[in-house]
Image (cartoon, rainbow, N blue to C red):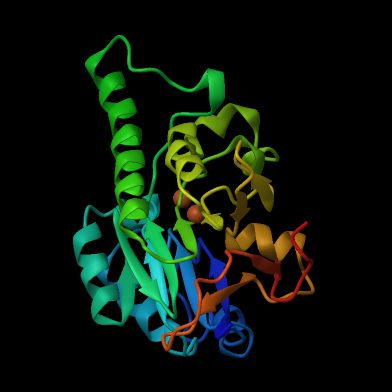
């Protein structure tokens, strides 16, 4: 079979600030090119969602030297300039996904920011005051956008990029009081309905690095503060390696993650 192994790196919550000294993120991004073929960024790319921060980030991303795909996070909306942030990043060569999908090096990416609302039987329901129903509707609409993006992909591998978590398992080390604000089970439903290879998300800086959906899809919390704390001796990004069919033919490859780790790491069971 004619195929290539493509390494997908992921990190979130760079929180690029206007006052950040140029080169600050080089410690994160400088090792990407030698360890990965694609870099996925899982939201909170900027600290307060300003154009200046987005421009700083584009300059910092130049050292990565691989194709870049991203979703925005809640911090990228803080200044009510998310469209401008998205445009600056897009002009800087980043594929910013918001209910969209893109194929890079034969790997399919479906991305949305996602939203909050909690998990499982304790998830917030659409009942009562209009503002509460509006809150729940935001999570439902993000889940529908994710479903549409996954449905449009025809690749052997689909990778879901989110900012908010779709499962409780990767936020378990956060204070329980804020767990409902860290993600939503509504995002898990489309992931379970499609053959998704892996999910990357951020947002939960003190969460847990790995979990699975109820159908067994691996979920990685790649918030930068979490990776730095849990894997202090590894580059602060996670990498999964997938096998993809070459453009010149051969049978479709079997979706199979080869390994996942922080920089380099352990085999997925
Ligand atoms: Fe964050
Ligand atoms: Fe966030």
Residue 203: give x, y in percent of width and height: 51, 50
Q: Quadrant of the N terminus?
A: bottom right
Whether residue 46 is visible, yes or no, is no
Residue 22: give x, y in percent of width and height: 46, 85
Which residue is drawn at the image coordinates 50% and 61% (left, top)? 13
Residue 149 lies in what quarter of the image? bottom left
Residue 118: give x, y in percent of width and height: 50, 29
Judging depth in this view, the residue of 185 and 45 nearest the camera is: 185
Q: Is residue 161 above or below residue 260?
A: above
Q: Is residue 206 above or below residue 69?
A: above
Q: Is residue 246 above or below residue 133?
A: below
Which residue is drawn at the image coordinates 25% and 58% (left, top)? 82
In the picture, measured across the screen, residue 35 lies left or right of residue 87, that is: right
In the picture, measured across the screen, residue 88 lies left or right of residue 146, that is: left
Q: Is residue 235 above or below residue 130?
A: below
Whether residue 208 is visible, yes or no, is yes
Judging depth in this view, the residue of 25 and 91 nearest the camera is: 91
Residue with the most extreme top position:
128
Residue 154: give x, y in percent of width and height: 37, 63
In the picture, measured across the screen, residue 173 lies left or right of residue 44, that is: right
Residue 227 lies in what quarter of the image? bottom right
Which residue is drawn at the image coordinates 39% and 45% (left, top)? 114
Residue 132 lies in what quarter of the image? top left
Q: Quadrant of the C terminus?
A: bottom right
Judging depth in this view, the residue of 161 and 204 nearest the camera is: 161
**Total marks in image:** 0
């Amino acid at each position: 079979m004619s195929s290539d192994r493509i390494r997908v790196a992921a990190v979130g919550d760079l929180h690029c600030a206007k006052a950040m000294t140029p080169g600050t993120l080089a410690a994160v991004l400088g090792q990407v090119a030698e360890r990965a073929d694609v870099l996925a960024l899982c939201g909170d790319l900027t600290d307060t969602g300003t154009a200046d921060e987005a421009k700083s980030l584009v300059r910092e991303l130049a050292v990565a030297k691989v194709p870049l795909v991203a979703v925005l996070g809640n911090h990228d909306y803080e200044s009510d300039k998310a469209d401008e942030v998205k445009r600056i990043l897009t002009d800087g060569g980043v594929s910013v996904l918001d209910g969209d999908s893109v194929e890079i090096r034969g790997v399919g990416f479906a991305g949305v920011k996602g939203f909050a609302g909690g998990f499982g039987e304790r998830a917030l329901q659409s009942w009562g005051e209009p503002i509460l129903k509006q809150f729940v509707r935001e999570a439902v609409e993000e889940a529908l956008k994710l479903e549409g993006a996954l449905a449009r992909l025809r690749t052997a591998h689909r990778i879901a990029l989110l900012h908010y978590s779709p499962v409780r398992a990767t936020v378990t080390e956060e204070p329980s009081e804020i767990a409902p604000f860290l993600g939503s089970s509504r995002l898990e439903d489309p992931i379970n309905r499609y053959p998704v290879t892996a999910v990357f998300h951020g947002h939960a800086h003190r969460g847990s690095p790995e979990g699975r959906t109820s159908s067994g899809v691996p979920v990685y919390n790649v918030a930068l503060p979490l990776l730095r704390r849990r894997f202090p001796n590894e580059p602060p990004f996670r990498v999964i390696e997938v096998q993809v069919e070459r453009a010149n033919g051969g049978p479709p490859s079997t979706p199979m993650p080869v390994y996942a780790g922080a920089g380099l790491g352990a085999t997925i069971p």
